[in-house]
Image: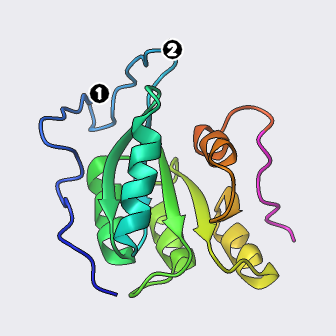
Amino acid sequence: MSSGPDDLSGSRPGAQSAHRPGGEPAARPADEGHAVVRVLIVDDSELVRLGLQSLFDMHGDLEVCGTAPNGQVGILLAVSTLPDVVVMDLSLPDIDGVETSRRILRDRPGTRVVMLTGNPSPASRQAAAAVGVEQYLHKGTPPEALLAAVRGGPGEPRLDRSA
C-alpha cells in the first residue's frame, strides 16, 4: 500500500524538543500539570497515522514526536526521537510489529509499546507479550481506552508475558 511522504525528522514543523544531558528528553509540564508523554506512531496506513496524531494532538499531555510507515523507519525514529510510548501496528509491510517492537525495546528498554491490530489472535498477542509489549488493542478499541493505554497510568492492565 502506497502512502504519502512521511516526516522523517520526527517532529512537526516548528516543534522544539528539550533534552537532559545524555540526550534523554526532558519532561515538560502539560496543560493539566502532568508530564508530557512523547508518542511515536508506527502504522503503514497514512489515514491511521493521521487519525492517531489528530487524536493525540487534542490532549495537552500527549505529544507526537514522530510517525513511521514501516518497521525500519519506526526503529530509526525510536532511537532519534526518544518516545516514551510507541503505538505500533501489528501488520507492517517490511518487519512485522512484534519484531519491530523487539528491536525498539532492545535499543530503548525504557520505552513502552502499545500494539494495535485489526486482526487480533491469541498467537500474536502471546508473541507481543513475549517481546515486552505492554498493551495489545484491537483497532476498534474506543479512543478513551487507547488514550489510557498510551498514558499507562496506575491500574492499566499489562500483557501477561508468562501466557
Residue 42 is at least partly visible in this image: no
Farthest residue toward the left?
A: 14
Quarter-wise, where is residue 151 in the image?
Answer: top right
- x%, y% of residue 7? 19, 59
Residue 33 is at least partly visible in this image: yes
The amino acid on which the numbered mark 2 sits, given as a three-letter code, is: Glu
Residue 32 is labelled as: 2
Magenta highlight on residue 120:
no
Range drawn in magenta: 156-163
Residue 20 is labelled as: 1
Q: Categorize mark 1 by other alpha carbons within 10 Å: few (<14), some (14-19), many (20+).
A: few
Which tag is nearer the camera, tag 2 or tag 1?
2
Main SS of the magenta segment?
loop
Disc 1 element: loop
For the C terminus, which image quadrant? Answer: bottom right
- x%, y% of residue 158? 77, 52
Q: Categorize mark 2 by other alpha carbons within 10 Å: few (<14), some (14-19), many (20+).
A: few
Question: Of label 2 and label 1, which has the lower sequence position?
Answer: 1
- x%, y% of residue 148? 66, 40
